[in-house]
Image (cartoon, rainbow, N blue to C red):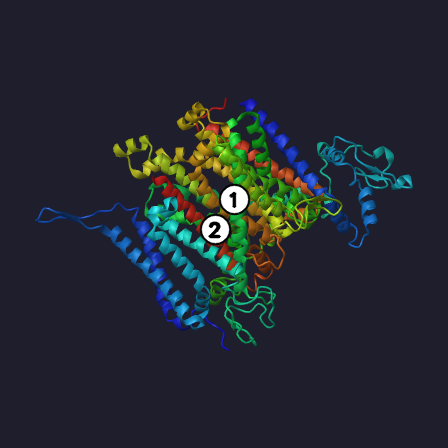
Amino acid sequence: MEPLTWTGSLSGLNYIFTVALILLAVSIVVQIALSFVPSGTTRAIHSDGTMASDSGAQGFVGMITSYLFYAVIALVAVYLVGGVLMGTGAGILGGMSRQMVPVWIALIVTFAVSITYKRKLGLYGKLFDSTVGMIGFALVMFWVFTGIMAGVFDMLTTHDTLSQVSGMKNKLPGTPMRSPDEGEYQWYLLGGDNLARDVFSRLLKGAWVVVQIAPLATLFAFMVGITLGLPAGYYGGRLDTFLSFLANLILAFPVILLFYLLVTPEIVQTGIPNYMAAFLFVFPLIFIGILLNSRYYTQPSFRTPLLIVVLGALGWLYLSLISTKGNIVDAGSYQIPGLPGFLDGFDIDPSILVVFVSVVFVNSPTVFRIVRGLALDIKTRDYVAAAQTRGEGPWYIMLWEILPNARGPLIVDFCLRIGYTTILLGTLGFFGLGLESESPDWGTTINTGRQLIRAYVHPLIPPALALLTLVLGLNLLADGLREESLRD
Amino acid sequence: MGLFILRRLGVMLLTALCLTFIVFWLTNLYPNLEKLAKNQGNFRMSDEDVASFLDDRGYLQPLPVKFGQWLGVMPGWVTEGEDPADTFGRCFLAGTPEEDRPTRCGVLQGDWGFSTVFKNEVGATVLTRLALTGKLMLCVLLLMVPSALIIGVLAGMREGSKLDRSLSTFSIATTATPEYVSGVIFIALLASSKFGVSPWLADMGWIDGKTLFLGSASSAMENATFWNFFLPVLTISLYGMGYIARMTRASMTEVMTAQYIRTARLKGVKFSDIVMKHALRNALIAPFTVIMLQIPWLLNGVVIVETLFSYKGFGWLLVQAAANNDIELLLAVSVISVIVVLVTQLISDIGYVYLNPRIRIS
């Protein structure tokens, strides 16, 4: 069988696409150059008293640029739709596009529903008023859908991520398999890596690792940061000095040194990650407990059952999370018993746990500093003084007066921080820390690929671009959210 | 002001002490010591051999005692040999006459210990590596700071213009590209003899060698040229550049909407004069702080880039020390990185006060 080319039978379009791209680049440069020159517009007064003005050279170039931009978008769409219709007939891109059909459908549905109801969806709906925000959201959701579909439902991928196929070692993208089994996908769409595994499938599976860990770790870091940062900012004094010192202490560590100290098999043996997990994961419990208690403590008949149900469920989750095989800490020489096995809902792989814990640990001091700064600023506002005069408790003021008013910057920072966490996970993989070496996540793939970088770049470029687009999407999303939240 | 600096120095000392103690504690956990023993001795040592190896070398003393010895406030350990000449200790080798044996040797005495990986004095090892990284950092700062400031000022000069949009998108894109991604892409595009632009350029006869740039910077340690040193420098600079540029842009837009700029425009001052003479000085106060605080962040980039481009500097040393649990080397490395972090913070605070006359430290 013939190896696939990149665009297959659509390759006639390549010239048009290249020309359009070059023209777009040129017109953007011209547009920027023109913006330095003052524009002279000509005005004409018509006989009926109306006045018209042309938009001048700048407007003309701007028009051309936007048409070229739409043309490029349309051509990309043609490649993708052509791929969906023709499959590998449209080359590697077509084959990938066909594989990703469920993702396209999910994306289109999300956007159609969100744009239809955008006026009723609050800040999320407003995101669809900004182009930058929409592009960012599309990039992020693309990887989220890909991660969930490939990781949970096992769709999209063409081959198993660990199986090695003879003759496919370091093969270029589009290489056909030598002797494919019945019903097996016949090509390695993005080529094979140095262990003859399919790069395309590993890329998609790797998305799940990131999509799973990064938002959750960021959420935990926010819980820790908020629970400690609010009282530090609100009370100030000794508590603030102490907590800020601790935060600065952790921030003074170079991140990579901290990872090298915390994320090693030797440290996992000592059980330190388990202690840290037990400490860090308790913060969501404290946070939600205080949140509900401070709101409803005037209605004990409602509060007490609510707290029992919520904290009971969370407590079970917490204990399941931190205990593995009936023990919270199993350091070999001693054990700390935890939830017995039959009650234990799920076990976390120790290597994932240590990565998760250290990422939360690295992120929470920064969140703490942000929340503390916001609390310091907001506590001088009139509504806080009003609540104090009403006789509200300090925790009520912190969680129900200060926190909702700090949500704008916190949501923006949350998006940025997920991106940063993704970068940190990649860094861990890059140094071969934490996750196993056959894990398909992007950092580890970059790490294994870089030994052969001078000879074969194709196993490296896809995960690098994937990480780049995901983080870029998150940054653009944060930018769009910031713009839209400032607009009110 | 003097009191402020004194207090900051005190906090610095305390932070450095706490931090080194944490590093000391983590590296002295038993599984780590076991790894160290097996690396130093051989991998098939029995548990008893490991214990006696560690005991002889003073690793099994209580943690505070060991930390005190490292600091130089406690007398160093001594292991008595059967023959008095075989006696050796922390501060002297076997065969040293009794009157030449110092009791204390630690950081306070200027002795940073002995590296188990490099079989050399820690102080000398760190200094050579630090000099190499200093060269890298200098180039990075020379490239990063001016370009970031120019991008930020150009973007913030006219908020919302096409130039602003393009430059802002560029800065967002650079902050979204970690060093290990941009480094890999640069090597693939510019420094691979099979892929990217180099084979094409070589066919056209436009470049002498096989590749446009060299993908490994190990030759840059002795003799740095544009050809072998530009890619690592560019890789580190790009990631930090976006952030500084965005901060500069924010500060510039704020200044450009100030009343005195409007007055100047109404008086008919040329736009270029407004930017150069009136706005620029005030707009560069905030970026100064950001640049200083960015320097510790560059350290991460240095570790990644030195690993990727095999440039054997301070970052590479950190990776080697951490991977082999070389305790004393790791402690020296962390002391230096803490000092870098805290000194840059101090400089940024003091510089901010001098640059911005509206702020006074009480």
Q: B224 or A398: which is nearer to us?
A: A398
Where does label 1 land, which residue? A219
Asked whether the residues under the numbered discs 1 and 2 touch, taking CB atoms below 8 Å apart as contact, a structural biologist would say no
Is residue B250 shown left or right of residue B180? left
Is residue A159 shown left or right of residue B284? right
- Can I make out residue B191 in this image? no
In this view, the residue farthest toward the right is: B83
Q: In the rendering, at what x and y percent does residue A385 appear? A: 43, 25
Q: Residue at x 44, y 62 (%)?
A: A102
Q: In what element is the residue under mark 2?
A: helix
Q: Label 2 amino acid?
A: Val
Q: In the rendering, at what x and y percent does residue B242 appear? A: 45, 45
Q: In the rendering, at what x and y percent does residue B357 appear? A: 43, 26
- The dot on residue B316 is none
Q: Residue at x 63, y 53 (%)?
A: A349
Quadrant of the rendered image containing residue A84: bottom left
- Crowding around mark 2 (Cα neighbors within 10 Å: few <14, some 14 to 19, many 20+) is many
Instruction: Give the vertical position of B228 relative to A157 (above or below).
Output: above
- Can I make out residue A232 in this image? yes
Subunit ID for the residue under disc 2: A
Where does label 2 land, which residue? A471
* Numbered disc total: 2
Q: In what element is the residue under mark 1?
A: helix
